Structures are given as C-alpha cells and as structure tokens.
Image (cartoon, rainbow, N blue to C red):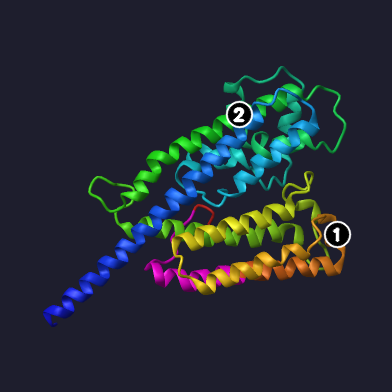
Amino acid sequence: MHHTARILIAAAAMAIATNARADTAAVVQDHIRPGFSAFAEAATTLAAIDSCDLETLRPAFNAAYDAWMQVAHLNLGPTEDNGRGLAILFWPDPKGSGWKAQRALLDGPAPSPEQMAQQSVAARGLPALERLLYPTEALLTDRCPLIHATADDLAATATTLSSAWGPFGDLMLTAGQPDNSRFLKPEEATQTLFTQLATGLEMLADRRIGRPLGTFEKPRPDLAEARASARSLRNITLSLAALKVLALTLNPDSPKTQAAFDQALSLPEAIDPDTDRLTDPQVWLKWEILQQAVRSTRDTAIAELGPALGVELGFNSQDGD
C-alpha cells in the first residue's frame, strides 16, 4: 500500500474515532447530565410542597413526570445501579403489587426515609405518587404522610442519580483511555448509547403503545401507562421527542432518521388522549399507525446511525423481556 494511502486511511480512522467521542461527549454533556439535573430539580420542587391539596400537588407531579420522560430511555449506569430507574418508574405492574404494598403502608405510621428506601420498587416513585394523587377509590386513612414520604424518596433518588452521572459520565467521556476499565474503546461508549436509542424505541412501540393497543378485537386501555393521570399519550410523545434528541445528538447529520422522527411525532396530535377511546376502531387504528411509525423510526435509525457511527447494536438489560 502506498505510504500516502496509509496516511489517509489512518487519518480517516482517527476522524471516525474522534467523531464517536465527540458525539458521545455531546450526548453526555448536552442531553444526559442536564436531563437528570432537571429531573432532580423537578422532584425536589415536588417534595418541597407542604400542602396535601391534590390540586396543588398535581402540577408539580406532572412536571416531575415530564422531566423523567426526558431521560427514562437512558437505562444504564447509575439508572441501573441499585434499581434506581425502577424505583422511579416501576411499570408495568401487572399484578398490582405497588398498590397492595401502599395500602399496607397507609395502615401504619408514615415510613421514615430509610424505611421508604427499603420498600419494594413497586411502592415507590411516580406510579406510587399517581395512585395517591389520582385515587380511583375512596381511602379511609389519611394519605398525606405517605404522599410526603413518597415524594421525599423520589427526590432523594433523583438527586443521587443526577450526582452519579458526574463520575459515570466521565467514564463515557474517557472511553478508551488506559485507566478506564468500563469502556475499553471509544466505540464502546457510543455503541452503548446507540443501543439505548434502539431499545428505547422498541420499548415505546411494544409497551407504551403496544400494551394498551392490545388487539383490534380486544384493546386494553386499562394497561396504559399513567392512565389515572391521563398522561398515557403525553408520555409517548415526550419519550419519542427525547429519543429524537438522543439520535440527533449522537449524529446530527441523519436526515432520514430526523424525517422518520418528525413523521412519528406528527401523529399524536390527531389522537384523542383519552385512552378509553381505544375501544373505538378509528382511534385504535390511529394508535396502530403510530406504533408502526415508531417501529419504522427504529429501523431507519439503526440503518442510518449505525454505519455513520461505526457501531452495531449491543446487549442491553431489557433483551428478552
């Protein structure tokens, strides 16, 4: 091989590696860290409310949920550690274990922060708060102490999570350096984020849309996420928008992926947010079209971003669920 050709190939390889690092750095610094910081701030604001008036608490609850949806797709590192992600959003809960555990807590004294942190993840986090702030049945006991205990626990988890993204983010930023045993090559950090993107879109299609969609003959609106607070479609839209940010931060020059996301994001506007309307065939079909658009977006992103970033899909903790 000609000496000049070797130099050009080596330069191109270095450019690809540099781009991978730069893309990863942008995701960590512009998407992940600000996102978790904003969630910690929103959760802390919710926990600081002294009142137990539902109309006072609900806007702060929804603001915290909105903030979580910006980062809920980042199920790695600090989010996986100690089950923090599940302690923030344990869903789906097909056996209703969260409400059972909460009823037991309502019958006793308010749990201390230490006791709350030891509870089942099903009895903690945003779904637990939703059951208390949007009750579907009358409660004979005072829910106020448990509301505050749950909100305080959520704020503590969110703050710990945001702080932990400092050192873990540094590991992603220094991928491939000799003292980094977590990410041995720069591409490993990029591959991890690329896999989170694909997994996030898959979960969005299969769970957030797929569970309430059910089948044409048997829709399951009762399985929708955040149904009591009427957030189901909002969560889908926010999740899709956050995944678009991740994709275009990873590789800004992705016109096909951007177009696919924009097409999918245009669809919820025409859908009735009342999930009970899923029993209407016309509404059901709109949800199914949205699901197809999300799956198409995933396929497009994998096909366009993978080669551009020089990575393939890796293993993720939700494989096989």
The N terminus - image quarter:
bottom left
Q: In the image, 266: left or right of 88?
A: right
Q: Is residue 17 above or below residue 296?
A: above
SS for dot 2:
helix
Reading the image, the residue beneath label 2 is 153
Q: Which residues lie in the magenta part? A: 296-316
Q: Is residue 123 above or below residue 199?
A: above
Q: Name the residue furthest top.
A: 109
Mark 2 → mark 1, Cα distance in angstroms: 35 Å
Q: Nearer the viewer, residue 275 or 2?
A: 2
Residue 205 quadrant: bottom right
Q: Is residue 88 magenta?
A: no
Relative image position of residue 311 (x, y in whole percent): 39, 66
Q: What amino acid is labelled 1 in the image? A: Arg
Residue at 46 percent across and 41 percent down: it is: 78
Q: Nearer the viewer, residue 217 or 85?
A: 85
Q: In the image, 174: left or right of 115?
A: left
Reading the image, the residue beneath label 1 is 277
The C terminus - image quarter:
bottom right
Residue 265 quadrant: bottom right
Residue at 67 percent across and 41 percent down: it is: 63
Q: Earlier in the sequence, mark 2 or mark 1?
A: 2
Residue 103 quadrant: top right
- Label the magenta part by its dominant secondary structure: helix
Relative image position of residue 71 (x, y in whole percent): 55, 48
